[in-house]
Amino acid sequence: MQQDNQHTPNAERLNVALFGLCNSGKSSLLNAIVGQPVAIVSDVAGTTTDPVRKAMELPGVGASLLIDTPGLDDMGELGVERVKRSTDVVDRVDVALVVFSNDVTEVEQALVEELRKREIPIVAVVSKCDQNPQVDQLCEHIEQTIGLKPIITSAKNGSGIDQLRGAIASLVKSEERLITEGFCEAGDLVMLVMPQDAQAPKGRLIKPQVQTLRELLDRGCMAMSCTAEQMPEALAALAAPPKLIITDSQVFDRVFALKPEGSVLTSFSILFARYKGDIEAFVKGAAAIERLTPSSRVLIAEACAHAPQNEDIGRVKLPRMLCGKVGEELSIDVVAGDDFPKDLTQYDLVIHCGACMFNRRHVMSRVAQASAQGVAITNYGVAIAALKGILSRVKTV
């Protein structure tokens, strides 16, 4: 097994979640997969009260995040809340392990149907095979009921664990997603314009900047970094214009005015819209900005629940730009983290952040939700480019 890189962000890891009834053996199975006592194991129903997460390196997969969830049949007032936390995990899971120990219930069948509806890969797992003399009959029943041939495992003696890891790996697409795919190639000079404001604390860069810079170096590109104020001097120091300029969305217009004719311009937010979401849906959704009226309602969604800064882009700058275009009467709601409404029909437009704290599955679940409810959705960078009137002149795909 490769040594796990603990510095890989959870948003960049493959999210593998274990679902099942109380006492189905999920926690023991998680401990067996990771080889550590990460989750508490008990015969008492409802021991797992919140999703338990463990980052590790899975053979054939790479950086992964394994998630143990509360039982789907948890009872009582608290049990209902625990079950909700389990089902909320579905929004972000890349591979689902559905764990059975006895029968196949309606609750488990409903979960499998929901996973299939969302096109989430499923591995059926029979746990505690060392304790079940009728394991063959159970496997046959699972295959007949949900159409999946289960992997037989025992957390106690380790049987089937390697096979389970291999099954997870086989479901993962081998092609790597790149942030800058199609924008530049090895040997190209790329200029990164990175304002240093309250959202980029002293001594640090924000996450999208770090990830993009690292990928450019890995791809063999030459990266040059500057602030918007330094951009004229930085360009003057070059023998030829950069192939690509990547800017923070907040200074789009300033950078666009300075961009050499031969350079392509995009933003970190647009790159992450492609990398994490559906850029075509976001560009289409941005057209809704022109249809907004003072009586319209807009939802701004942030992935991370950070403490707002004085010039926070989602809570201050975007609302100011929207109200400046549409009118001060425009109604704008801001949500953060998992506080994303189930009902979006009250909104005329959803504007999502770059989602550097979410995996792609999580973002796409929100795009699908908006689409199903007939609500336009876009993201910060695309919306800002549209509001500044330069969306058609920057590279998005």
Image (spheres, grey):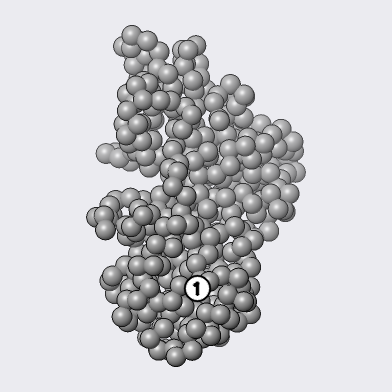
What is the secondary structure assignment of the residue under circle 1? loop
Image quarter (top left, top right, bottom left or bottom right) of the N terminus: bottom left
Quadrant in which residue 238 is drawn: top left
- Label 1: which residue? 150
Residue 373 appears anywhere in the view? yes
The spot of residue 153 in percent (x, y) is 40, 77
Question: Which residue is drawn at the image coordinates 38% and 73% (left, top)?
Answer: 160
Give whichever of 3, 374 is nearer the camera.
3
Query: Given the current orientation, which residue lies at the most extreme left position?
Result: 3
Residue 306 appears anywhere in the view? no
Query: In the rendered view, does 293 fall on the left or right side of 192?
Result: right
Query: In the rendered view, does 40 fall on the left or right side of 23?
Result: left
Image quarter (top left, top right, bottom left or bottom right) of the C terminus: top right
Q: Amino acid at mark 1?
A: Pro
The spot of residue 392 in percent (x, y) is 62, 24
Query: In the rendered view, does 258 fall on the left or right side of 379?
Result: left
Give whichever of 234, 147 is nearer the camera.
147
Quadrant in which residue 340 is drawn: bottom right
The spot of residue 134 in percent (x, y) is 49, 89
Question: Which residue is drawn at the image coordinates 42% and 71% (left, top)?
Answer: 68
The spot of residue 227 in percent (x, y) is 36, 25
Query: Relative to 346, does residue 154 appear above or below in the rendering?
Result: below
Quadrant in which residue 177 is drawn: top left
Question: Which residue is drawn at the image coordinates 57% and 50% (left, top)?
Answer: 364
Query: In the rendered view, does 295 fall on the left or right side of 157?
Result: right
Question: Which residue is drawn at the image coordinates 39% and 67% (left, top)?
Answer: 163
